[in-house]
Every structure is written in C-alpha cells, then in structure tokens.
Amino acid sequence: MDFDFTKDEILTLVLLQDAETQRVKIQSSIDTLLEEIETRRAKLLEQEELVKRAQYMFNEEQKLYREKEQEAKARQDLIDKNQQRISSIKTNKEYAAVLREIDDQKKKKASVEETMLLSMEKLEAVEKQLLKVQIAYTAEEKRISEETEKLLKEVEEQKKDLLEAEKQRTLSKEKVPQKLAQLFERVTKRVKPPILVSADNAVCSGCHMNIPAQTYNELHKLNNLKLCPFCERILFLNCILEEN
C-alpha cells in the first residue's frame, strides 16, 4: 500500500514520532517510579503484619500466664481456707479428709506454677521477638518514608517534563498533514512503537525482517511511505530525508 507525501511532510511525521517517543519514555519512567513506591509500601505492610503477628502472640501468651496466675491464687485460697478449718475439726476422719484436700491442692498449685514458669520463659522470648520486629519496622518505616519522599519528588519533576513533552507532541502533530496524521494514528492502534521505522538496506528496523525488493525500490523511486508487509509499521528511507 502506497502513501504519497513530500519529503518535508514525511519529515514532520518523523518529528512527531520523536516527540511521541519522548512522551512515552517519560510516562514509562513515571510508571516505573510509581511501581517502586508501591513496592516499598507493600514491603512496609509486610513488616507491619509481622509486628501485628508478634503482638498477637505476646498478648495470647500474656493472657495464658495471667490465667494460670489466677488459677494458682485460687488454689492457694483453697489451701488457706482448709488450713483455717483444721482448728475447728472434731473427728480424725474429717481431719484426714482436710489434709488430703490440702495436699491435693498443693500438688495442683505446684503443677500450675510449673506451667507458669514455662509460660514466663515463652512470654519473655515472645516479648523479645516483638521488640525485635518493632525496632525493625521503625527503621524500615523511616527508610521507606525517606525513599518514597525522594521518589515522589522525582515523579513531580517528571510530570512537568511529561507536560512539556505532550505540548511538544501537540505542536508537532499540528504540522503533520491530516491524511498523514490519520495514517500514523491508525497504525498506532495496531502495532507497538515505534510506528514509523526506517528501511535502509532493505531491512525493516521495526521487525528486522528483509522487505521485498520491489517495496525497497519503490521507497527509493517515490516520495512515499509504505507499510512493512510483516509488522505493518510505516516504512521510510533515512537516506532520502538526509538528501533533502
């Protein structure tokens, strides 16, 4: 498919693509920066989740220790109550029963206290881990906050560059003939940039395929553009523009 245009008109399209390439490059850079910011925020959320998990484990272990502490106190209260009863006991049978009850409560209390010791050791270990992840989170939060601030400033600077690039693209597009601009936009919807590619040495610089000899010869003979039969990008010859 042939599209007849003057060399100057083709040159305006080259300049439009240069402006579009610059705009896309800046937008891609902004997107990358925003992705980096999101990645850092995700990492901070992971650290925050570690803190929440450690805090939960600490709270659960502390709750278990306090429950055992209350149970030990209850056992001691029963022991004290039964010891107070001894002075008012009148029969040997009742006396023996109270002693057995006291001995049973002491054994149960001893078992609870042993559990409390193990729980205290675990509680101390969990508390140590909690402190560790809290310190790590605080340091990570500070680091990520500083990095994010720098990245956001860079994004703002690049947004200014993007506005300038978009302005340049608009100015370049105004100089392109309508028919040529429509061709450019139509091909843009079908293929990825670059849209306008050189075919010097009979090779499409877009897909790196050898174009037919007839197509290459026609690009030399005519002031026209042709579509690559393989990737459908717009072909032109740099050498003709340089001659101009």
Image: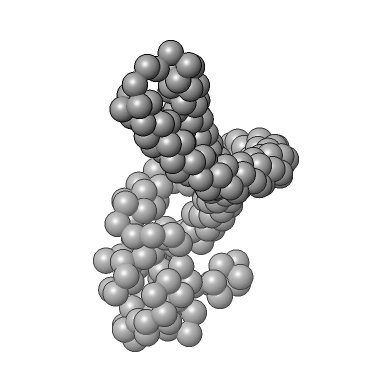
Residue 178 locus on image (x, y percent): 39, 43
Residue 239 locus on image (x, y percent): 56, 75
Q: Quadrant of residue 212?
A: bottom left
In this rendering, position of residue 137 left or right of residue 95: right
Q: Nearer the viewer, residue 28 or 62?
A: 62
* Relative height, residue 238 to residue 68 (above, below): below
The residue depicted at 38 percent of the width and 64 percent of the height is: 234
The residue depicted at 48 percent of the width and 22 percent of the height is: 83
In this rendering, position of residue 179 left or right of residue 75: left
Q: Nearer the viewer, residue 201 or 137?
A: 137
**Where does the N terminus fall, quadrant-wise?**
bottom left
Q: Nearer the viewer, residue 91 or 195?
A: 91
The residue depicted at 37 percent of the width and 34 percent of the height is: 100
Residue 242 locus on image (x, y percent): 61, 70
Q: Answer whether residue 149 is visible to the viewer in this image.
A: yes
* Relative height, residue 67 to residue 40 (above, below): above
Please name the colour scheme applied to the rendered image.
one colour
Residue 208 locus on image (x, y percent): 41, 80
* Relative height, residue 213 to residue 146 (above, below): below
Furthest toward the front, the residue is 91
Q: Answer whether residue 164 is visible to the viewer in this image.
A: no
Furthest toward the top, the residue is 88
